[in-house]
Image: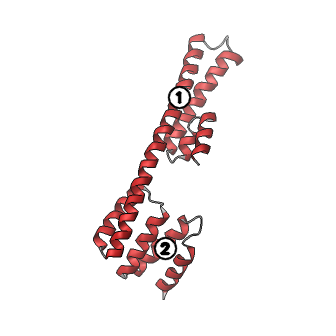
Amino acid sequence: MAQVSWLINLIIPGAGLIRSRREWLGASLGLFFGACGNLAVAGAFIAPAAIPAWLTWLSASLAALAWFLSQVLLVRQRAFQRQCDENLRDLLRETKTALDGGDVTAALANLKRAAHLDAENVEMHVLWARLYTHEGDREGARRMWQRVLKYDRRRVHEQEARQAIGAARE
């Protein structure tokens, strides 16, 4: 996915940022690049007599700046995302250890911090559902297992989730 975002961002500045979960920033940079690029092309090739040369150069410079900024921001976003992924893996590992040791308070605290890092992480929702099941909260467990089904695109936890949802209804 990183290579695809990188390639897309080279061709269409901001599109890689959109794929990297920075939608507003990517869309804003893309629109800015498009507007400046169109003005530069119009000033250079379509209507050079109607658009002053200084405006053509300014818009071309701003389009180039937007393209460069888009590349830099994508590199920074990827580094930030890698750090978040590492922190999330550590939190989930600590949560599993806490659940295995019966420390519900620590597990819940870790899950809350993990939710701030990635609210759509499947493993986090699985652990949260197991925590609710362990605590006897059938409604909370059912909601979390439904989220697992929603976010689990590879269907790794589908069978466990469906069984748990069926058990929660009984």
* Residue at the (71%, 18%) spot, across then down: 46
Picture coordinates of residue 127 (x, y %)?
42, 70
Q: Total marks drawn?
A: 2
* Residue at the (56%, 25%) spot, across then down: 63
Q: Nearer the viewer, residue 90 or 66?
A: 90
Q: Is residue 11 above or below residue 128?
A: above
The residue pinned by badge 1 equals 68
Calculate the distance from the C-alpha at mark 1 to the C-alpha at mark 2: 43 Å
Picture coordinates of residue 7 (x, y %)?
62, 39
* Farthest right residue in view: 46
Q: Is residue 72 visible?
A: yes
Picture coordinates of residue 89 (x, y %)?
42, 59
* Residue at the (49%, 44%) spot, across then down: 22
* Farthest bottom residue in view: 170
Quarter of the figure with residue 119: bottom left
Kind of residue at badge 1: Phe
Q: Is residue 93 above or below residue 39?
A: below
Quarter of the figure with residue 42: top right
Q: Nearer the viewer, residue 46 or 17?
A: 17
Task: Classify residue 79 as left or right of residue 7.
Answer: left
Picture coordinates of residue 76 (x, y %)?
46, 39
The residue pinned by badge 2 equals 145
* Residue at the (58%, 25%) spot, across then down: 36
